[in-house]
Amino acid sequence: MAVFQVFIDVLNDHRISGWCFDLHDPGTPARLTFYADGQKLGDVAADTHREDLKALNLHPTGRCGFEFSIPDSTVVGSCASLYIYARGSGGPIWECRADEVPRMISGKLPAVFFMHIPKTAGTSFNTFISSLLHKDAVATHIENMETDRYLSLQKEKSYLAGHLPLRDIKRWFDISRFDLLTLLREPYRQLHSHVRWIKNIGADPEGGFFLSHHRFFRELALRLNEPDFSIPDGLEALSLDQPGDLVSLFDNNQTRHFLDGNPKKVSRSDFQAAKQNLDCFKLVGATEQYTQFVSSFCNSYGLNYIDQRQRFNQSNGEMLFDYHDENVKLKLFPLVEFDLLLYEHVVKNRLWDRRD
């Protein structure tokens, strides 16, 4: 009997998107049927390519994504529940009470720019926003776009997000037009997750995920696949004595995002500058208090808060190093010294709960 795994990325009263496949036959795209109460809304095949799922080792080919547009004639608010069936499932593989479905915002939000620091639950927040806004109003991962598109993005989109540090946001965008938001994460966890993500890029040097990245990241990913991070000597690959490109990526990376420059190594004066630049942001949250951050965002913009299950952008890979071990923490401390101070400052001062 078929056993389906399904995950919903975007859910609102206009569309449902995500991914789904039969665990016993992942190579054959699932055929999905959508219902509101007992009424059939339509069918789609879960056959859209999702390179991210392949890279995260969640699906062998990544060909399992889907997007379904709810018919205009269906008023979700007047229904009791939504259901998804898959051919061969014998019953619903997903269901949701209609009063738990976010309503897409009909008006326009003030322009928001989310500075997406890697591995801080930014993917979860982008997904949450995508459930509130029309897809044409949202642009994420803008770091992958040509900079000559940035001017039009400012005029056309309500929500922008990307792996851009503050210095680049200031360079390419008029930040007076935006409410800036971001999330920080406990630094040792963020460092581990960031290293593992980049290392995973090099897991399959012949695959599309590897080839889709910039040469810099491809070369770095291959280098990170050489050492054994579970032993002390392996951690030397992350020391501040390594080449500058690697140092700039892992040396207090979260603090670097708040700087107006890009120093060779982050210093205490840089930390002070980063702390001052927090004032550029309307909301600064912590991954570990993600629910409070989203709730504060909704309160700030007069939105109804619906509890969101976090979608951390994590792979299923094993732990590279034990960031709970005191010896490991001591070894890695120079890479997170100022991130720890910045994170502590944000959490202590509850900056995710700021008000104008």
Image (cartoon, grey):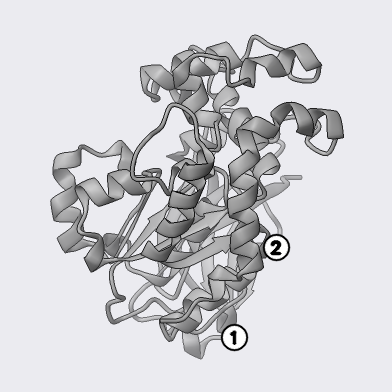
Residue 130 in the figure: left or right of residue 5:
left
Give neighbour class at mark 2: few <14, some 14-19, many 20+ (Cα, 10 Å).
Answer: few
Q: Check whether the beta carbons of the residues at disc 1 and disc 2 lie within 8 A of each other.
A: no
Residue 91: image tag = 2
Residue 247 in the figure: left or right of residue 48:
right
**x and y percentages locating residue 295 in the rendered image:** 56, 76
- Return the residue nearer the eye: 62 or 137: 137
Residue 314 in sight here: no
Give the CA separation, mark 1 to mark 2. 17 Å
Numbered marks: total: 2
Up the image or down, 20 lies above or below 227; here it is below
**x and y percentages locating residue 244 in the rendered image:** 46, 18
Residue 176 in the figure: left or right of residue 191:
left
Up the image or down, 263 lies above or below 105; here it is above
**x and y percentages locating residue 277 in the rendered image:** 40, 57
Give neighbour class at mark 1: few <14, some 14-19, many 20+ (Cα, 10 Å).
Answer: few
In the orientation shown, which residue stands out farthest toward the bottom? 78
- Return the residue nearer the eye: 20 or 124: 124
Q: Secondary structure at mark 2?
A: loop
**Residue designated by label 1:** 80
Q: Secondary structure at mark 1?
A: loop
Residue occupying image coordinates x 56% and y 58%: 8
**x and y percentages locating residue 254 in the rendered image:** 52, 44
- Return the residue nearer the eye: 20 or 251: 251
Q: Quadrant of the C terminus?
A: bottom left
Residue 57 in the figure: left or right of residue 63:
right
Q: Amino acid at mark 2?
A: Gly
Q: Between disc 1 and disc 2, whose residue precedes?
A: 1
Residue occupying image coordinates x 73% and y 47%: 3
Up the image or down, 57 lies above or below 231; here it is below
Residue 346 in sight here: yes
Up the image or down, 234 lies above or below 91; here it is above
